[in-house]
Amino acid sequence: MTVDNALLSDQRLRITALEPFGLALHAVDRGRPPTDLPVPSLRALVREHRLLLLRDFAGFDEPAELSAYGARWGRLSVWPFGTVLELVQQPDPADHIFDHSHMPMHWDGMYREHIPEFQIFQCVHAPGEGNGGETTFSDTAAVLTNADPATRALWSRATGTYHRKMEYYDSTCVSPVVTAHPVHGTPVIRYNEPTAEADERFVNHPDLEFSGLADKSELAELHRGLRAALYDPSHLYAHAWRTGDLVVTDNYTLLHGRNAFTNGAPRHLRRVQVLGDPPLANPGLVR
Ligand SMILES: [Fe+2]
């Protein structure tokens, strides 16, 4: 593990590796403000380890504080609701994002003008022991490294066309399944995992179509193989939230989703998105 020196020499941090990827920085003195840690060092850690957990630091009481913290990392994505998304179950959700259901793997920004480099999540309230609701992250660079050549060749022929209409957008995105990390060119996967159309409990299905494959059996093999690899324990980190956690992720490399949680569990996350420098114009957005 290569850890940035400024943080390695910080006696008030306990640093542990997450499995199968990611790094956790625990505040030794509970309630230390996360603003104590230099953002350039943290940014380097996220780029190297894909995911960084800050645990036992002081929380942010108000959404504006999370937004101000995110702005230390870079320019934030601005949505119709502002910069902070309140991820909390709604009583009669118009979209699965605000439900308690499973959230399929996807990358943030796929339907937006810019793809954020980082996501910063704050756990305002954990769902509670045994209630599920883990946010799932898959390391797609590792998935590709470990895929056998024939499987990788099949995935590399496929292109996904995704259309999704919800409160904040009505957009189409077209992306090869295998593409290159926009900064260093490492092969990564961009994929929105399908959910069964028959699942009526899943609110507001996106429309997905895949081209470049010979027939239905290749298409079935694409989805089967990707699902198996993305959720393989050697590539998947499922974060079990504790109140106060801050998690920062590399959205250029990872795909993420959510495990279903108990209906009515008090799960409350906030999220901001940090754009790259320069911001990455979404190469897949079709107007
Ligand atoms: Fe997302």
Image: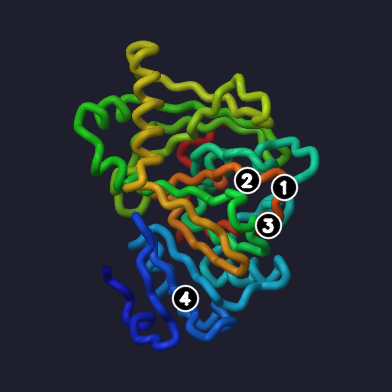
Mark 4: amino acid: His
Task: Residue under label 4, please give it.
Answer: 26
Task: Residue under label 3, please give it.
Answer: 268
Mark with earlier residue (2, 4):
4
Task: Residue under label 1, please give it.
Answer: 89
In the foreground, 78 or 129: 129
Mark 2 beta carbon near ligand 1 (under 8 Å): no
**C-beta proximity under 8 Å, tags 3 and 2:** no
Mark 3 and mark 2: span between their CA atoms? 12 Å
Mark 3: amino acid: His
Mark 2 and mark 1: span between their CA atoms? 10 Å
Mark 2: amino acid: Phe
Mark 3 and mark 4: span between their CA atoms? 21 Å
In the foreground, 159 or 93: 93
The quadrant in which the N terminus is found is bottom left
Mark 1: amino acid: Gln
The quadrant in which the C terminus is found is top right
Mark with earlier residue (3, 2):
2
Mark 2 and mark 4: span between their CA atoms? 26 Å
Mark with earlier residue (4, 1):
4
Mark with earlier residue (2, 1):
1
Is residue 136 positioned above or below 242 on the image?
Answer: above
Which type of secondary structure does the marked residue at label 2 adopt? loop
The crowd level at tag 3 (other Cα within 10 Å; few <14, some 14-19, many 20+) is: some
Task: Residue under label 2, please give it.
Answer: 261
Which residue is located at x 35 percent, y 66 percent? 17
Mark 2, mark 4: which one is toward the viewer?
2
Which residue is located at x 34 percent, y 29 percent? 225
Res 56 quadrant in image: bottom right
In the foreground, 283 or 164: 164
**C-beta proximity under 8 Å, tags 2 and 1:** yes
Q: Percent x, y for residue 121? A: 57, 60
